[in-house]
Image: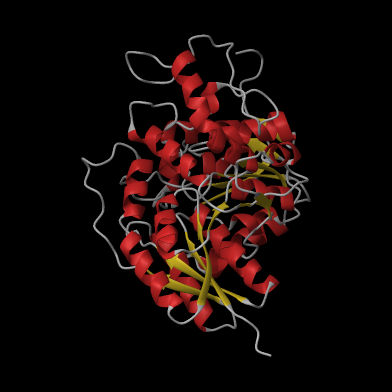
Amino acid sequence: MAMDKYEVVFISTPLIGNLVPTVEFSHHLTRHDPRFSATILIITVHERIIVNLYTQSLATAASHSQSHVNFIHLPTVQPPTRYQYQSSLGYTSLFIDKHKPHVKHAISTLASTTSVAALFVDMFTTSMIDVAQDLGIPCYLFFASPASFLGFMLHLPALATQLAADFVDSHSGLIAPKDSAIELIVPTFSKPLPPSVLPSSVLKRNKDGYFWYLEHARRYTETMGIVVNTFLELEPHAIASLSISGLPPVYPVGPILDHAGASQWHTDGAQLHDSIMEWLDQQPPSSVVFLCFGSMGSLKGPQLREIAIGLERSGYRFLWSIREPPKGKLDLPGEYTNVEAVLPAGFLDRTAGLGLVCGWVHQVRVLSHQAIGGFVSHCGWNSILESVWHGVPIATWPVYAEQQMNAFELVKGIGCGDKIGLQGGQ
């Protein structure tokens, strides 16, 4: 008897940190149950070259393999005008929403030839829940961040009342604690949260980013279930706290990782990766501190120079990935044409036998090397999972989005990281 076949459709925010775990999850799903195939709908942002290289490589790989995961590049749309948004999240949310007609057409076309079992949205593509409802398709949320942050998002509508009462400056509209001793209770965090660790968009009630956080959080409860890239041994408190009546069921399925990393598709490819791995091969085990701040992370000149001074004074071996800040609002960090110009004079010469400075690096492959003894990380969730997988201790240096909250939970709650801060009471 012929086996029934089902199609599962995914739509992801067009960022590496969202798209990569979505793709990996789709592969896990189709390998786990041969009845399922997956189609991933790709939203294109022309300015994000790294994301586009990745999506192009996916389509090429799918055409040369027996994978049951297919990719459809949606037609491009006109971006929102600068008068329609105030924040990067506002832009992203409106831009994604404009793709709803194309998503509906793509799913309807698939449904004409196969049985579409579900649509998976992610944390910022929740407007596509409307499409699933219109077509009568079950909708689920794939959440690529930790369960602790999922709990914050689900708790945010209720938390907004407390924030307004206790933390809002009436003149600026910014959330600034009137009493620095006041902390926030979020059920999925084992320790009370200082307001300073909240995402910057949540701290600006007079900007549209705050509205969009609330809107996305509200829509999570409209899904039939939430799949989270985490696991019970890492976040037992957060996962247990999400078993609440009235919420969709939560399924921890992690850690979902891309073990190959960018070595298969990045433009610098194997040559750069090989030179870094050869250098690591020459270092003693657990002797190198690795500094890397993610696909969207970059630091400005004064910060780079302070880090360089600290590394040189420490005397420890290091591998340091440095990215140039993005030139435009939609751009991602790029590569310095002359990295020596942004570092202290003579730094590269003085540390030549001690450390290595590079641009884009294949992070997961580096973390797997026996020479790596510590990881200074921006605390993106994918990076945390990769570090935990390879048993590398983390020193936290959060840069943007929910990374402050990830770092807080990593240090105060889970207890597998250390906070970078001033010593000696300064």
Tell me where residue 49 appears, x and y as whole percent: 38, 60
391 with respect to 68 (left or right): right
In the rendered image of this protein, does residue 235 appear above or below residue 128?
above
Pick the front one: 138 or 50 = 138
Q: Is residue 399 visible?
A: yes
Pick the front one: 72 or 249 = 249
In the rendered image of this protein, does residue 80 appear above or below residue 196?
below
188 with respect to 126 (left or right): right
425 with respect to 93 (left or right): right
Which residue is found at the position 56% from the left and 33% from the top? 155
Q: Most extreme residue toward the top, as rendered?
A: 179
Which residue is found at the position 64% from the left and 77% from the top? 35
Tell me where residue 145 appears, x and y as whole percent: 58, 46
Tell me where residue 69 appears, x and y as whole percent: 55, 74
Pick the front one: 262 or 21 = 21
In the rendered image of this protein, does residue 216 appear above or below residue 227?
above
Tell me where residue 177 appears, x and y as whole percent: 49, 14
- Hey, which quadrant is residue 293 in on the image? top right
- Hey, which quadrant is residue 176 in on the image? top left
User: Which part of the image, by quadrant, shows the N terminus?
Assistant: bottom right
